[in-house]
Image: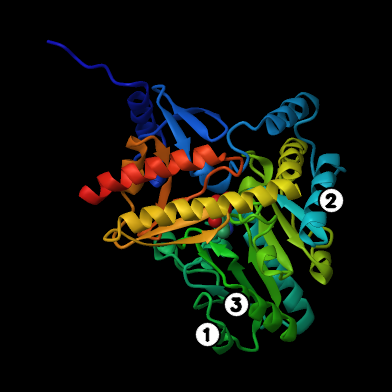
Amino acid sequence: MSTISPTAGQLLKERAERVLMPNYGSRDLALVRGEGCWAWDADGNKYLDFLAGIAVNNLGHCHPAVVDAIQKQAAKLIHTSNGVLIEQQIELAELLCEGTGMDRALFANSGAEVTEAAIKLARMWSVEKFGPSRYKIIVFKGSFHGRTYGAMSATWSPKVRKGFEPFVPGFVFAEFNDLEDVKAKWDQDVCAVMLETVQGEGGVRPATPEFLHGLRQLCTERQAVFVCDEVQCGMGRSGKRMAYQLAGVQPDLVPLAKALAGGFPLSALLAKGEFAEVFTKGRHGTTFGGGPLACAAGVASTRVLFDDAFLTEVGRKGCKLWGLLADIAKEFPDLCNHVRGVGLMQGLVLKRDAMNFPIVARRHGIIVNATAETVIRILPPLIVSDEELEEGARRIRAAMAEFAAS
Ligand SMILES: Cc1ncc(COP(=O)(O)O)c(C=O)c1O
Protein backbone atom coordinates (compact mmCIF):
# COMPACT_ATOMS: atom_id res chain seq x y z
CA MET A 1 0.00 0.00 0.00
CA SER A 2 1.48 3.36 -0.98
CA THR A 3 0.95 6.50 1.09
CA ILE A 4 1.41 10.07 -0.16
CA SER A 5 3.32 12.16 2.38
CA PRO A 6 1.95 15.63 3.11
CA THR A 7 3.69 18.62 1.54
CA ALA A 8 5.55 21.20 3.66
CA GLY A 9 2.61 23.57 3.13
CA GLN A 10 0.07 20.98 4.29
CA LEU A 11 2.10 20.29 7.43
CA LEU A 12 2.18 23.99 8.29
CA LYS A 13 -1.56 24.22 7.69
CA GLU A 14 -2.21 21.34 10.11
CA ARG A 15 -0.04 22.93 12.80
CA ALA A 16 -1.67 26.35 12.26
CA GLU A 17 -5.15 24.93 12.61
CA ARG A 18 -4.25 23.40 15.96
CA VAL A 19 -2.79 26.49 17.62
CA LEU A 20 -3.84 29.70 15.84
CA MET A 21 -7.21 31.40 16.33
CA PRO A 22 -9.36 30.86 13.25
CA ASN A 23 -10.01 34.58 12.60
CA TYR A 24 -8.15 34.55 9.25
CA GLY A 25 -10.04 31.49 8.04
CA SER A 26 -8.41 28.46 6.53
CA ARG A 27 -5.11 29.35 4.87
CA ASP A 28 -3.46 27.17 2.25
CA LEU A 29 -0.51 29.21 1.11
CA ALA A 30 2.72 29.32 3.15
CA LEU A 31 5.10 31.93 1.74
CA VAL A 32 8.65 31.47 2.98
CA ARG A 33 10.79 33.72 0.77
CA GLY A 34 10.42 36.84 -1.33
CA GLU A 35 12.49 38.92 -3.72
CA GLY A 36 11.16 41.97 -5.55
CA CYS A 37 7.75 41.13 -7.05
CA TRP A 38 8.23 37.38 -6.56
CA ALA A 39 7.51 35.04 -3.63
CA TRP A 40 8.10 31.32 -3.05
CA ASP A 41 5.99 28.93 -1.00
CA ALA A 42 7.17 26.20 1.37
CA ASP A 43 7.10 23.66 -1.48
CA GLY A 44 9.22 25.77 -3.82
CA ASN A 45 6.40 27.11 -6.05
CA LYS A 46 7.02 30.62 -7.37
CA TYR A 47 4.35 33.36 -7.52
CA LEU A 48 4.10 36.85 -8.93
CA ASP A 49 2.97 38.80 -5.87
CA PHE A 50 0.45 41.40 -7.06
CA LEU A 51 -0.98 41.91 -3.57
CA ALA A 52 2.25 43.09 -1.89
CA GLY A 53 1.14 42.09 1.59
CA ILE A 54 -2.01 44.21 1.02
CA ALA A 55 -0.22 47.41 -0.01
CA VAL A 56 2.64 46.97 2.47
CA ASN A 57 5.50 45.78 0.25
CA ASN A 58 5.45 48.85 -1.99
CA LEU A 59 9.19 48.33 -2.51
CA GLY A 60 8.74 44.62 -3.18
CA HIS A 61 10.04 41.85 -0.96
CA CYS A 62 13.29 42.45 0.90
CA HIS A 63 14.32 45.70 -0.82
CA PRO A 64 18.10 46.02 -0.32
CA ALA A 65 17.88 49.54 1.18
CA VAL A 66 15.34 48.39 3.78
CA VAL A 67 17.21 45.15 4.57
CA ASP A 68 20.47 47.06 5.00
CA ALA A 69 18.87 49.70 7.25
CA ILE A 70 17.25 47.04 9.46
CA GLN A 71 20.41 44.96 9.74
CA LYS A 72 22.58 47.93 10.64
CA GLN A 73 20.11 49.41 13.11
CA ALA A 74 19.36 46.03 14.75
CA ALA A 75 23.04 45.69 15.57
CA LYS A 76 23.15 49.22 17.05
CA LEU A 77 19.94 49.98 18.98
CA ILE A 78 16.56 48.24 18.71
CA HIS A 79 14.41 49.92 21.35
CA THR A 80 14.65 52.74 23.86
CA SER A 81 11.47 54.51 24.93
CA ASN A 82 9.62 57.60 23.84
CA GLY A 83 11.07 59.33 26.92
CA VAL A 84 14.27 59.94 24.95
CA LEU A 85 15.15 61.56 21.63
CA ILE A 86 15.28 59.06 18.75
CA GLU A 87 17.24 60.36 15.77
CA GLN A 88 15.63 58.00 13.23
CA GLN A 89 12.15 59.11 14.41
CA ILE A 90 13.03 62.77 13.94
CA GLU A 91 14.52 62.13 10.49
CA LEU A 92 11.45 60.21 9.36
CA ALA A 93 9.11 62.94 10.62
CA GLU A 94 11.18 65.51 8.68
CA LEU A 95 10.96 63.46 5.48
CA LEU A 96 7.22 62.85 5.84
CA CYS A 97 6.32 66.45 6.65
CA GLU A 98 8.48 67.84 3.85
CA GLY A 99 6.94 65.47 1.29
CA THR A 100 3.30 65.89 2.25
CA GLY A 101 2.76 69.50 3.29
CA MET A 102 2.07 68.48 6.90
CA ASP A 103 3.72 69.95 10.03
CA ARG A 104 4.21 67.26 12.69
CA ALA A 105 4.14 63.47 13.08
CA LEU A 106 3.17 61.05 15.83
CA PHE A 107 4.25 57.43 15.46
CA ALA A 108 2.50 54.16 16.32
CA ASN A 109 2.55 50.59 15.02
CA SER A 110 -0.54 49.89 12.91
CA GLY A 111 -3.15 51.61 10.77
CA ALA A 112 -5.94 51.17 13.30
CA GLU A 113 -3.87 52.89 15.98
CA VAL A 114 -3.40 56.04 13.92
CA THR A 115 -6.99 56.31 12.72
CA GLU A 116 -7.87 55.87 16.39
CA ALA A 117 -5.41 58.66 17.23
CA ALA A 118 -7.00 60.88 14.56
CA ILE A 119 -10.43 60.33 16.13
CA LYS A 120 -9.11 61.14 19.60
CA LEU A 121 -7.24 64.22 18.40
CA ALA A 122 -10.22 65.61 16.46
CA ARG A 123 -12.53 65.17 19.43
CA MET A 124 -10.09 66.63 21.91
CA TRP A 125 -9.54 69.68 19.72
CA SER A 126 -13.27 70.23 19.21
CA VAL A 127 -14.49 69.56 22.74
CA GLU A 128 -11.87 71.92 24.18
CA LYS A 129 -12.63 74.64 21.66
CA PHE A 130 -16.42 74.38 21.32
CA GLY A 131 -17.73 72.35 24.26
CA PRO A 132 -18.54 68.72 25.11
CA SER A 133 -21.40 68.07 22.70
CA ARG A 134 -19.35 68.75 19.56
CA TYR A 135 -17.83 65.30 19.00
CA LYS A 136 -19.54 63.75 15.96
CA ILE A 137 -17.50 62.57 13.00
CA ILE A 138 -18.88 62.11 9.49
CA VAL A 139 -17.55 58.89 7.94
CA PHE A 140 -18.61 56.99 4.83
CA LYS A 141 -20.46 53.97 3.57
CA GLY A 142 -17.91 51.46 2.26
CA SER A 143 -15.24 52.65 4.70
CA PHE A 144 -12.62 50.62 6.55
CA HIS A 145 -10.47 52.30 9.21
CA GLY A 146 -9.33 49.35 11.35
CA ARG A 147 -10.43 46.98 14.08
CA THR A 148 -9.91 48.81 17.38
CA TYR A 149 -13.12 50.12 18.94
CA GLY A 150 -12.99 53.68 17.67
CA ALA A 151 -11.66 52.71 14.22
CA MET A 152 -14.21 49.89 13.95
CA SER A 153 -17.03 52.24 14.95
CA ALA A 154 -15.95 54.45 12.01
CA THR A 155 -15.98 51.42 9.69
CA TRP A 156 -18.99 50.64 7.54
CA SER A 157 -18.62 46.92 6.82
CA PRO A 158 -21.29 44.86 8.62
CA LYS A 159 -18.87 41.87 8.53
CA VAL A 160 -16.33 43.83 10.58
CA ARG A 161 -18.90 45.21 13.05
CA LYS A 162 -21.11 42.17 13.61
CA GLY A 163 -21.25 41.08 17.25
CA PHE A 164 -19.29 44.01 18.70
CA GLU A 165 -22.12 46.34 19.71
CA PRO A 166 -22.35 48.78 21.40
CA PHE A 167 -20.04 50.95 19.30
CA VAL A 168 -18.31 54.19 20.19
CA PRO A 169 -21.06 56.79 19.68
CA GLY A 170 -20.92 59.79 17.38
CA PHE A 171 -20.10 58.33 13.94
CA VAL A 172 -22.48 59.44 11.20
CA PHE A 173 -22.34 57.55 7.88
CA ALA A 174 -22.79 59.46 4.64
CA GLU A 175 -22.74 58.32 1.00
CA PHE A 176 -19.22 58.27 -0.47
CA ASN A 177 -18.64 60.85 -3.23
CA ASP A 178 -21.94 62.61 -2.42
CA LEU A 179 -21.38 66.10 -1.03
CA GLU A 180 -25.12 66.83 -0.75
CA ASP A 181 -25.53 63.82 1.54
CA VAL A 182 -22.66 65.06 3.71
CA LYS A 183 -24.36 68.45 4.01
CA ALA A 184 -27.67 66.76 4.85
CA LYS A 185 -26.05 64.68 7.62
CA TRP A 186 -24.06 67.61 9.09
CA ASP A 187 -25.40 69.11 12.32
CA GLN A 188 -23.97 71.52 14.91
CA ASP A 189 -22.24 68.67 16.80
CA VAL A 190 -19.97 67.60 13.91
CA CYS A 191 -16.26 68.10 14.60
CA ALA A 192 -14.60 66.17 11.77
CA VAL A 193 -14.95 64.37 8.45
CA MET A 194 -12.84 61.25 7.89
CA LEU A 195 -12.53 59.35 4.62
CA GLU A 196 -10.14 57.08 2.79
CA THR A 197 -8.87 59.07 -0.18
CA VAL A 198 -9.26 55.80 -2.08
CA GLN A 199 -11.48 53.23 -0.35
CA GLY A 200 -9.48 50.00 -0.27
CA GLU A 201 -11.47 47.29 1.50
CA GLY A 202 -14.64 48.95 0.17
CA GLY A 203 -13.69 47.94 -3.38
CA VAL A 204 -10.92 50.27 -4.66
CA ARG A 205 -13.15 53.34 -4.96
CA PRO A 206 -11.35 56.68 -5.38
CA ALA A 207 -12.88 59.85 -3.95
CA THR A 208 -13.45 62.27 -6.82
CA PRO A 209 -11.38 65.50 -6.83
CA GLU A 210 -14.65 67.50 -6.63
CA PHE A 211 -15.71 65.57 -3.54
CA LEU A 212 -12.34 66.09 -1.83
CA HIS A 213 -12.37 69.81 -2.61
CA GLY A 214 -15.98 70.07 -1.43
CA LEU A 215 -15.16 68.36 1.87
CA ARG A 216 -12.08 70.55 2.36
CA GLN A 217 -14.17 73.66 1.86
CA LEU A 218 -16.96 72.50 4.17
CA CYS A 219 -14.46 71.61 6.92
CA THR A 220 -12.77 75.01 6.62
CA GLU A 221 -16.04 76.96 6.60
CA ARG A 222 -17.59 74.98 9.47
CA GLN A 223 -14.43 74.64 11.57
CA ALA A 224 -14.15 70.88 11.42
CA VAL A 225 -11.11 68.62 11.03
CA PHE A 226 -10.54 67.11 7.58
CA VAL A 227 -8.96 63.65 7.86
CA CYS A 228 -7.69 61.71 4.83
CA ASP A 229 -6.92 58.10 5.78
CA GLU A 230 -3.97 57.19 3.53
CA VAL A 231 -3.11 53.93 5.30
CA GLN A 232 -3.64 51.92 2.11
CA CYS A 233 -3.46 54.43 -0.74
CA GLY A 234 -0.57 56.56 0.58
CA MET A 235 3.22 56.14 0.36
CA GLY A 236 3.47 56.43 -3.42
CA ARG A 237 0.82 53.91 -4.42
CA SER A 238 -1.23 56.46 -6.37
CA GLY A 239 1.77 57.86 -8.25
CA LYS A 240 1.92 60.77 -5.77
CA ARG A 241 3.39 60.60 -2.30
CA MET A 242 -0.16 60.84 -0.95
CA ALA A 243 -3.30 60.18 -2.98
CA TYR A 244 -4.85 63.50 -1.86
CA GLN A 245 -2.05 65.22 -3.80
CA LEU A 246 -3.65 63.94 -7.03
CA ALA A 247 -6.56 66.29 -6.31
CA GLY A 248 -4.38 69.08 -4.87
CA VAL A 249 -6.16 69.27 -1.51
CA GLN A 250 -4.49 69.58 1.90
CA PRO A 251 -6.02 67.63 4.80
CA ASP A 252 -5.59 68.50 8.50
CA LEU A 253 -4.81 64.95 9.63
CA VAL A 254 -3.35 62.02 7.69
CA PRO A 255 -3.12 58.50 9.15
CA LEU A 256 -0.37 56.45 7.42
CA ALA A 257 0.79 52.86 7.93
CA LYS A 258 1.23 49.76 5.75
CA ALA A 259 4.07 50.67 3.33
CA LEU A 260 5.66 53.25 5.62
CA ALA A 261 8.59 51.06 6.70
CA GLY A 262 8.98 48.60 3.81
CA GLY A 263 7.17 45.76 5.63
CA PHE A 264 8.28 46.56 9.17
CA PRO A 265 5.32 47.52 11.43
CA LEU A 266 5.12 51.29 11.74
CA SER A 267 2.39 53.92 11.42
CA ALA A 268 2.19 57.68 11.65
CA LEU A 269 -0.41 60.35 12.16
CA LEU A 270 0.56 63.55 10.33
CA ALA A 271 -1.02 66.80 11.43
CA LYS A 272 -1.15 70.34 10.13
CA GLY A 273 -1.36 73.78 11.73
CA GLU A 274 -3.23 74.04 15.02
CA PHE A 275 -4.05 70.31 14.88
CA ALA A 276 -0.34 69.54 15.20
CA GLU A 277 -0.37 71.18 18.64
CA VAL A 278 -3.32 69.32 20.22
CA PHE A 279 -1.55 66.32 21.75
CA THR A 280 0.42 68.10 24.44
CA LYS A 281 2.45 66.25 27.08
CA GLY A 282 0.81 63.07 28.37
CA ARG A 283 -2.26 63.18 26.13
CA HIS A 284 -1.39 60.29 23.87
CA GLY A 285 1.38 57.74 23.52
CA THR A 286 2.49 54.17 22.93
CA THR A 287 5.47 52.05 24.01
CA PHE A 288 6.73 50.82 20.65
CA GLY A 289 5.57 53.58 18.28
CA GLY A 290 8.45 55.22 16.44
CA GLY A 291 11.26 53.05 17.81
CA PRO A 292 14.74 53.26 16.27
CA LEU A 293 14.49 50.00 14.31
CA ALA A 294 11.09 50.70 12.75
CA CYS A 295 12.04 54.29 11.93
CA ALA A 296 15.37 53.26 10.38
CA ALA A 297 13.33 51.02 8.04
CA GLY A 298 10.89 53.90 7.55
CA VAL A 299 13.61 56.37 6.57
CA ALA A 300 15.12 53.91 4.06
CA SER A 301 11.75 53.11 2.55
CA THR A 302 10.40 56.70 2.47
CA ARG A 303 13.56 58.01 0.76
CA VAL A 304 12.91 55.68 -2.19
CA LEU A 305 9.12 56.07 -2.27
CA PHE A 306 9.17 59.89 -2.12
CA ASP A 307 11.64 60.30 -4.99
CA ASP A 308 10.05 62.33 -7.82
CA ALA A 309 11.41 60.21 -10.68
CA PHE A 310 10.27 57.03 -8.90
CA LEU A 311 6.77 58.48 -8.48
CA THR A 312 6.54 59.51 -12.14
CA GLU A 313 7.28 55.89 -13.05
CA VAL A 314 4.56 54.66 -10.66
CA GLY A 315 2.08 56.92 -12.43
CA ARG A 316 3.15 55.64 -15.87
CA LYS A 317 3.04 51.99 -14.78
CA GLY A 318 -0.36 52.60 -13.17
CA CYS A 319 -1.75 53.70 -16.58
CA LYS A 320 -0.20 50.62 -18.18
CA LEU A 321 -1.75 48.31 -15.56
CA TRP A 322 -5.15 49.96 -16.03
CA GLY A 323 -4.89 49.40 -19.81
CA LEU A 324 -3.88 45.74 -19.43
CA LEU A 325 -6.79 45.10 -17.05
CA ALA A 326 -9.24 47.00 -19.26
CA ASP A 327 -8.25 44.68 -22.15
CA ILE A 328 -9.01 41.65 -19.95
CA ALA A 329 -12.36 43.19 -18.97
CA LYS A 330 -13.18 43.58 -22.69
CA GLU A 331 -12.25 39.97 -23.41
CA PHE A 332 -14.63 38.69 -20.72
CA PRO A 333 -17.67 40.98 -21.09
CA ASP A 334 -20.04 38.50 -19.42
CA LEU A 335 -17.84 38.40 -16.33
CA CYS A 336 -16.24 41.83 -16.02
CA ASN A 337 -17.79 45.22 -15.44
CA HIS A 338 -14.98 47.76 -15.46
CA VAL A 339 -11.59 48.70 -13.99
CA ARG A 340 -11.16 51.50 -11.45
CA GLY A 341 -8.44 52.84 -9.21
CA VAL A 342 -5.44 55.14 -9.07
CA GLY A 343 -1.79 54.41 -9.91
CA LEU A 344 -0.83 50.87 -8.95
CA MET A 345 -4.00 50.38 -6.88
CA GLN A 346 -6.54 48.94 -9.30
CA GLY A 347 -9.77 46.99 -8.96
CA LEU A 348 -11.30 44.78 -11.61
CA VAL A 349 -15.02 44.90 -10.87
CA LEU A 350 -16.85 41.69 -11.74
CA LYS A 351 -20.52 41.08 -12.45
CA ARG A 352 -20.51 38.17 -10.02
CA ASP A 353 -18.93 37.14 -6.71
CA ALA A 354 -15.14 37.43 -6.99
CA MET A 355 -14.19 35.99 -3.61
CA ASN A 356 -12.92 32.67 -5.06
CA PHE A 357 -10.90 34.28 -7.84
CA PRO A 358 -7.68 34.54 -5.78
CA ILE A 359 -7.60 30.74 -5.32
CA VAL A 360 -7.92 30.23 -9.08
CA ALA A 361 -5.30 32.93 -9.69
CA ARG A 362 -2.82 31.14 -7.45
CA ARG A 363 -3.05 28.06 -9.64
CA HIS A 364 -1.81 30.35 -12.42
CA GLY A 365 1.09 31.61 -10.31
CA ILE A 366 -0.20 35.03 -9.26
CA ILE A 367 -1.27 36.42 -5.89
CA VAL A 368 -4.13 38.96 -5.83
CA ASN A 369 -7.11 39.28 -3.52
CA ALA A 370 -10.81 40.02 -3.72
CA THR A 371 -12.76 42.54 -1.69
CA ALA A 372 -16.27 44.00 -1.41
CA GLU A 373 -17.65 40.71 -2.84
CA THR A 374 -17.14 41.56 -6.52
CA VAL A 375 -13.80 43.37 -6.83
CA ILE A 376 -10.45 41.75 -7.69
CA ARG A 377 -7.88 43.99 -6.01
CA ILE A 378 -4.50 44.34 -7.70
CA LEU A 379 -1.69 46.00 -5.75
CA PRO A 380 1.70 45.18 -7.32
CA PRO A 381 4.88 46.39 -5.66
CA LEU A 382 5.71 49.86 -7.01
CA ILE A 383 9.08 48.59 -8.26
CA VAL A 384 7.29 46.30 -10.75
CA SER A 385 8.80 46.26 -14.27
CA ASP A 386 6.83 46.58 -17.52
CA GLU A 387 7.61 42.91 -18.28
CA GLU A 388 6.28 41.85 -14.87
CA LEU A 389 3.08 43.85 -15.43
CA GLU A 390 2.62 42.10 -18.78
CA GLU A 391 3.35 38.70 -17.23
CA GLY A 392 0.88 39.49 -14.43
CA ALA A 393 -1.81 40.37 -16.98
CA ARG A 394 -1.14 37.07 -18.84
CA ARG A 395 -1.61 35.14 -15.60
CA ILE A 396 -4.77 37.06 -14.62
CA ARG A 397 -6.20 36.44 -18.11
CA ALA A 398 -5.50 32.69 -17.83
CA ALA A 399 -7.10 32.63 -14.37
CA MET A 400 -10.10 34.56 -15.70
CA ALA A 401 -10.62 31.98 -18.46
CA GLU A 402 -10.69 29.20 -15.83
CA PHE A 403 -12.91 31.28 -13.51
CA ALA A 404 -15.34 32.06 -16.37
CA ALA A 405 -15.74 28.36 -17.04
CA SER A 406 -16.42 27.52 -13.38
C1 LIG B 1 -7.66 52.63 4.86
C2 LIG B 1 -7.26 51.78 6.03
N1 LIG B 1 -7.24 52.33 7.25
C3 LIG B 1 -6.88 51.61 8.33
C4 LIG B 1 -6.52 50.28 8.21
C5 LIG B 1 -6.13 49.49 9.43
O1 LIG B 1 -4.77 49.19 9.37
P1 LIG B 1 -4.15 48.00 10.27
O2 LIG B 1 -4.65 46.72 9.70
O3 LIG B 1 -2.66 48.18 10.12
O4 LIG B 1 -4.61 48.23 11.68
C6 LIG B 1 -6.53 49.68 6.95
C7 LIG B 1 -6.17 48.26 6.78
O5 LIG B 1 -6.42 47.62 5.80
C8 LIG B 1 -6.91 50.44 5.83
O6 LIG B 1 -6.95 49.91 4.60
In this view of the protein, which residue sits in the foreground, 91 or 187? 91
Up-down: is 106 above or below 84?
below
> Which residue is drawn at the image coordinates 75% and 38% (left, top)?
300
Q: In the image, residue 361 lies at what x, y percent? A: 35, 42
Q: Residues within 10 Å of mark 3 (few under 14, many from 20)?
A: some
> Which residue is drawn at the image coordinates 65% and 89% (left, top)?
188
Element type at mark 1: helix
Q: Which residue is mark 1?
A: 181
Q: Amino acid at mark 2?
A: Glu
Q: Which residue is mark 2?
A: 94
Q: Amino acid at mark 1?
A: Asp
In this view of the protein, which residue sits in the foreground, 42 or 39? 39
> Which residue is drawn at the image coordinates 71% and 69% (left, top)?
248
Q: Earlier in the sequence, mark 2 or mark 3?
A: 2
Where ligand 1 lies, by image quadrant?
bottom right
Element type at mark 2: helix
Q: Amino acid at mark 3?
A: Phe
Q: Ligand 1 closer than 8 Å to the CB at disc 2? A: no
Q: Earlier in the sequence, mark 1 or mark 3?
A: 1
Question: Taking the image as drawn, is residue 137 in sight?
Answer: no
Q: Residues within 10 Å of mark 1 (few under 14, many from 20)?
A: few
Between the residue at mark 2 and the residue at mark 1, the CA separation in whole angstroms equals 37 Å
Question: Taking the image as drawn, is residue 396 in sight?
Answer: yes
Up-down: is 345 above or below 229?
above
Q: In the image, residue 233 lies at what x, y percent? A: 60, 56
Q: Which residue is mark 3?
A: 211
Looking at the rendered image, the disc whose residue lies closer to the viewer, 1 or 3, is 3
